[in-house]
Amino acid sequence: MALFGSTPRTVRLEGSRVDLEARRAPWSLWADGFGRLAIRSLQIIVVLLIAAALIVGMQQITVVTIPVVIALILASAFAPVMGWMRRHGVPSLLATIVTLLTIVVLLGLVGWLLVWAVRNQWDELYGQAEEGVQQVIAWIGTLPFEIDQAQIDEWIASATDFVTSAQFGSGALAGVSAVANFITGFVLLVVVLFFFLKDGPQLWEFLLRPFRGAHYARARRIGDKTVTTLGSYIRGTAAVAFVDAVGIGIGLVILQVPLALPLAVLVFLLAFIPIVGATLAGILAALVALVSNGLVNALFVVGIVVLVNQLEGNFLQPVLMGRTLKLHAFVVLIALTIGTVLGGVLGAVLAVPITAVAWGIAQVWDGEDTPARWARQKRSEEVA
């Protein structure tokens, strides 16, 4: 009986030794809380390295990546037009050709208007703005408190260096400066856009072949959400930019501010850079009005710009773009900063729509109307 009674104790002792050896094993260091934190940190580092490698690689072949991205955005913006024509019996090839010619004509008109209205009067516009800056500096000198002139000169030099630096002017402007790259990129843009318009759903379906089950459904949701978000954002932004340009342009004409048409064109173009673009356009218009028409007229211009921007932010954007695409101003500023650093002017233009796409994908990650777990809004009882 004593022999049989000692068996459970022996088993327990052997189990304790096994547990102790397991805890002493090297891999056991990754099982506690700090070990899991280290694993997550390594995973984040690997993801960041892969993302950095992709970004650097895309920067090396901008002549390919930029046309492909722009073609994707344009195809997403005109996807409803293609769908409408196909539903009404228009052959796919004919619908693609009509849509492609429409896009090329619109791009050509915008480019021609930019060259005609801005480039031809750029010297006068630049001179007016420079003189306005000098008047502002002179007014600062009349303030009751003293501001060091050397500090003002340093600020101006820093702003000038930033605007003229490769960091700010890289991407779109640096690529367009080379005629050969521009022609190559434009031809590639047209070709890629043709295939995106004609065979976009088939191309995406081909990329989804490795996925099965729930992963396939999630990939389909991501593709649909990307096209919807990009299209809605670009169409809404273009409409808002057009309304801003018309409103501010009419105000400048009424106030008899010179260069009203070039300033309206700049308002339209800069509206594609949220927050920053509207601010820059308003400052430039106010400076021109200050030089040509005086301080009171410049204040009226500022009032018109502020009024138009308020109507845009509170009425046009929610109606035309939908509140689901509305990003917080802090997120927009961070995205603009990162986009400008990585891609210059083009990066600043594409940063916000790409961020909107990323947020849209998070909103359909676990279902059609089910955001990812980390993106779900907590209920009040859960917070309590």
Image (cartoon, rainbow, N blue to C red):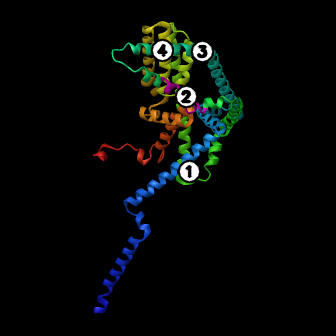
Q: Which mark is residue 123?
A: 3
Residue highlighted by disc 2: 235
Q: Nearer the viewer, residue 33 or 169?
A: 169
Q: Which residues are magenta?
A: 156-171
Give the amino acid at mark 1: Tyr
Which residue does the image show at 33% across and 80% down from the upper left? 12
Dot 4: few (<14), some (14–19), or many (≥20) neighbours within 10 Å? some
Q: CA distance from mark 1 to mark 4?
A: 60 Å
Instruction: Please tell me whether mark 2 or mark 4 is closer to you in this view.
Output: 4
Tag 2 secondary structure: helix
Tag 1 secondary structure: helix
Residue highlighted by disc 4: 134
Q: CA distance from mark 2 to mark 4?
A: 39 Å
Q: Which mark is residue 216?
A: 1
Q: Nearer the viewer, residue 184 or 358?
A: 184
Tag 4 secondary structure: helix
Give the amino acid at mark 2: Arg
Q: Earlier in the sequence, mark 2 or mark 1?
A: 1
Q: CA distance from mark 3 to mark 4?
A: 16 Å
User: Which x, y percent locates residue 258?
Assistant: 54, 9
